[in-house]
Each structure stands twice: as C-alpha cells, then as structure tokens.
Amino acid sequence: METSRRPIQGTTIFDGAQAMKGYALNKMCFSFNSAENRAAFAADEGAYCRRFDLSEAQIKAMRERDVLGLLALGGNIYYLAKFAGILGLNVQDVGALQTGMTVEAFKAKLLAAGGGNG
Amino acid sequence: MAEVVGGLGTSHVPAIGGAIAKGLQQDPYWKPFFDGLPPIRSWLAENRPDAVIIFYNDHGLNFFLDKLPTFAVGAAPFYHNADEGWGLPVQAPFRGVPDLSWHVIEHLVEREFDITTCQEMLVDHAFALPLQLFWPDGDAPPAVPIAINTVQHPLPSISRCLKLGRAVGEALASWRGCKRVAVIASGGLSHQLDGERAGFINKAFDQQFLDELEANPDALSRYSIHDVVELAGTQGVELLTWVAMRGAVSASSKRRHVNYHVPISNTAACQLLLAP
C-alpha cells in the first residue's frame, strides 16, 4: 500500500488499510439498511456493537457519537451515514459535528462556497 | 444500430429524494436546482430514448466491502430499490433491458474490461434519482445500470472510466435491439461529507471540469484520483461517472444545457445535457 501520498488537509482516504481497520464497524453500519436491525441497535447499542465484534475503541466512539474518531478507526462515511440516519442527523449536522461549527455556521459556509449563487 | 441521442448528468444528493417526496420543488432552497430540469425534460420529450445507460455509484445498498467490484453491469429484467437507512421512500421497481445488458457485457469483456455482471442488483438513490428527476411522471425508459466503485480506494482512473464509456458507446453503436439510447451520469460535482474538511466545495474546479468534459475530456486524465480528491472532495470522485458518460456519447457532442448551483445539501449540484 502506498504510504508516500501527499496529505490532504482534514481528509482521510478510505483505502485498503482503512477498509481493513473499519471492516467490522462498516459491516455493522451496513446492517442498518434494515429497519429491524436499526431497532435492535437502538434497543441495546452496546450489545449490538459487540455482536459485530467492534473494538473497544470503536464501541467508545459509537457511544460518544465521535464521527472523526469513527473515521480514524476505519469508518467509511457512506456506511456511517446510516448510523447518522438512526440518530436523525443529516449531512449538515454531521458536517457541523466534524468541523466543530454550529449547524447554522456550517450551512453558511456551504452558501458562501457558491459565492451568493450558482 | 442504436443512436446515442445524448448524455445527461445530474447530482444525486439523497435530500433531493426527500424534497420530491415532500413536494418542495418550488421552495426557495430547492427551486434553483429543480429549475434546471425543464429544458432537459423538453429535450427528452423530443428525442424519446427507448433505453438508458446509467453510470452511478452504489452507497452501500447493494455492495458491501466483502465483495466490491470496480465496474458492475446489471443484467436483470427489474431492479429493486430498498431501504437505505435514512428514510427515503422506497421506489417502485425499475425496468431493465437484459438483452442490451448482455450485449454491453459481451462488448466490454471483448474490450478487456473485467467487469462484474449482476442478475440481481438493488439500486440506490444514485440510480433512482436521475430517473425521478428527468421523468417525473414515472414513464422513464428501461435502463442498464453500470456501477463504478467510488467507495473504497484504489478507484479506477479518469482515463479508465473514459475508456469504459467509449467501449459502452461502441456497444450501443452495434446494438440492433432499439433505436435511441441516452446515457446518464449520476453523482458529483465537488463535495466532501467526511473529516475536518467536510463541506469542501470547489466551484472553480467544477467549472473547469465541465468545460474540459465537453471540449477535451482526454485532458482530464492528467488528474490522478488523489488529485481529484484534493480538488473535488472525497465524494467529488463521483465525477468519474460523468467522465464515463462523456466517453459514451459522440465526441462532437456539445453542452446544450447546464445548471450549476451551490449548495444542495453539502454538494455543488449540477445538471448537464450534452448532445450532438
């Protein structure tokens, strides 16, 4: 695996190393496509995480809704988005969580990226 | 011989599906996006494709990391949508064109693309939304889905996706089963959902990408996937689907319509029509 790629600020490439690290975590989040599984998770989060063999660090990050921590532990945002769905969070909420901004400030940043309009 | 009547591109942010379900097309937030659609719908009404090819990326509905193909071609009579975990209404099944799928598959393998073929394939919002947007009355033509991995790196290069699109275009040119085919790209443009750089959008890059996609798509091959992540964001890599679409339509195609609007959700949203 390539290790000499130039870093991109605030960005983790979801490559083989991350995919191996996060396999169990992402597999659990993939299971959230099913309403029955979402309900089982909500009923007992810790037990559901252990059923999928998450590491202690991953279980802690899940418990703390620590999105950056989950990404560092191999989570992929497409799968983590299904966890966010259970929490009733949209991608602006998740963006705010990761950037340490309020949701309003995060939305204002997106609007500013358009320079006022398209 | 089928004629490729044109290529269409659109963003596929899941929230667009929510906006359709709630009838928010005229809401001030959504209007600039939905206002881009009538010219495309008029063009489709005039050009009446019998079938469509859809280049898109799966977001963890059909494919998981246990088996993740770089390129996957659907070969089913119907494609089912399903619960993706975030509350979008599940769409009625979409019609496929198995004969055309197998014709495309035969041609791609002959051209040395080692694709995965899928006789069952759930299709997520990235496949469904373009059909909902372009054919709001539910009368979309049958489709051949072609999924490109944008989830787990390594991803296929821009050059490879352009060649994939060109090989699909060749397959269509030798297809006798229907007369008129449109090619759709679903994804992009610049956006990033994850990390401290979440919310990254790059309008200047998107504009340059659209210009080059039209006039000189081969030049885009100078960007590595790492460059694309840096310039367009971690999910901006979905623009690979646009590159594949460009390859499938005639080289002389021109931009007939474009609507670029920032932001829709976390994304620089765009609709594009390329046609000879």
Image: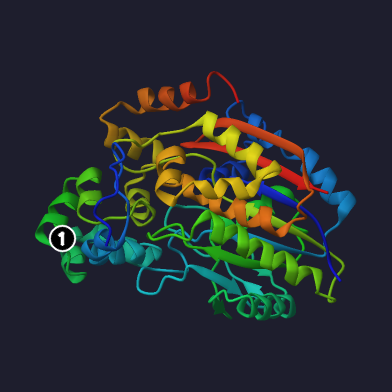
Residue B23 seen in the current view? no
Image location (x, y in percent) of residue B36: 71, 36
Question: Which percent across, then down, holds residue B32?
Answer: 65, 29
User: In terms of depth relative to the viewer, which is nearer, A42 or B196?
Assistant: B196
Quadrant in which the N terminus of chain B is drawn: bottom right
Q: What percent of the width, then of the height, locates residue B210?
A: 63, 39
In this rendering, is residue B210 above or below B124? above
Q: As displayed, is residue A70 above or below residue B172?
A: above
Establish if B174 lies above or below A97. below
Q: Is residue A29 left or right of residue A114?
A: left
Q: Amino acid at mark 1?
A: Gly
Q: Residue furthest left?
A: A56
Q: At 73% from the left edge and 40% from the top edge, which residue is drawn? A: B37
Chain holding disc 1 = A
Q: Which residue is mark 1?
A: A46
Other-residue count near label 1 (Cα within 10 Å), few / some / many at <14 / 14–19 / ≥20: some
**Residue located 54% across and 50% down the image:** B221
